[in-house]
Structure formats: C-alpha cells, structure tokens
Amino acid sequence: MIRQKSIRLGDILDACIPENSTLGKGLLGARIKDAYSQTVGSSAAAATMNVTYKDGTLRCKISSSVYRMHLAANKDEIMKSINALLGKEQVKSIIFT
C-alpha cells in the first residue's frame, strides 16, 4: 500500500464549509476562542468569563480588573498573535470589559 500525503481535518472542513454559513461562523468563533486562550495563557484565560466574536470584533469579559488592565495594555500583541494562529486577519479589534 502506498501512503499518500495526509490532509488535516481542519483543512477539509475549511474547504467544505463556507465561511459565511452559520456553521462556518460557529467554527470560526470556536477557533478564535481557542486561539485567545493559547495567546493569553491559562491564568488570564481562567479570569476570562466570556469570549464572543462578531464582525471582526472580539469581546472579552474579564472577572479581574488587574487582568483586564494588563490585557488591555497588550491588546495589539494579543490581536497579532491570534491572527497569526488563525492564518489570516480575522480579529480587527478587541474589547475588554
């Protein structure tokens, strides 16, 4: 048996599911939430109560004012890192509340 080049499941889903569909938007939101958690680290992710994404804006509700101020001061770096993990510029602004 000849082994063929493997393809990631995420690549197959991206090719089969249109981005503007409801399922595509849900998958994108899940990928952005995961990228946010990877970017900010486990302790800041634990202090984040809610993460929502809509129309290029990532809204994060933070339970601690200390974390909120720290994240807001570094939001440009966080945004660049999230977009780098996603492979394209999806997040255009971040709002910490």
Image (tube, grey):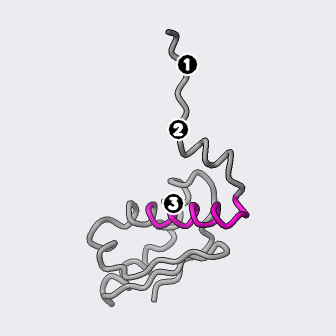
Residue in view at x 48 percent, y 74 percent? 75
Is 44 positioned to the left or the right of 36 in the image?
left
Q: Secondary structure at mark 2?
A: loop
Q: Amino acid at mark 1?
A: Gln
- Neighbor class of circle 1 (other Cα within 10 Å; few <14, some 14-19, many 20+) is few
Residue 19: percent from the left, percent from the top?
69, 59
Q: Which residues are magenta?
A: 19-34
Chief SS of the magenta region: helix
Above or below, 27 relative to 13: below
Residue 55: percent from the left, percent from the top?
67, 75
Above or below, 93 relative to 9: below
Residue 66: percent from the left, percent from the top?
30, 86
Q: What number of labels is visible?
A: 3
Residue 36 highlighted magenta (yes or no):
no
Residue that label 3 marks: 31
Residue in view at x 44 percent, y 66 percent? 36
Q: Marks 3 and 2, how far apart in space?
A: 15 Å
Q: Amino acid at mark 2?
A: Arg
Residue in view at x 68 percent, y 53 percent? 17
Residue that label 2 marks: 8
Q: Are marks 1 and 2 in contact (CB under 8 Å)?
A: no
Residue in view at x 64 percent, y 49 percent? 14
Which quadrant would the C terminus be assigned to in this image?
Answer: bottom left
Is 19 positioned to the left or the right of 32 in the image?
right
Residue that label 1 marks: 4
Q: Marks 1 and 2, how far apart in space?
A: 13 Å
Residue 93: image tag: none
Q: Are marks 3 and 1 in contact (CB under 8 Å)?
A: no
- Neighbor class of circle 2 (other Cα within 10 Å; few <14, some 14-19, many 20+) is few
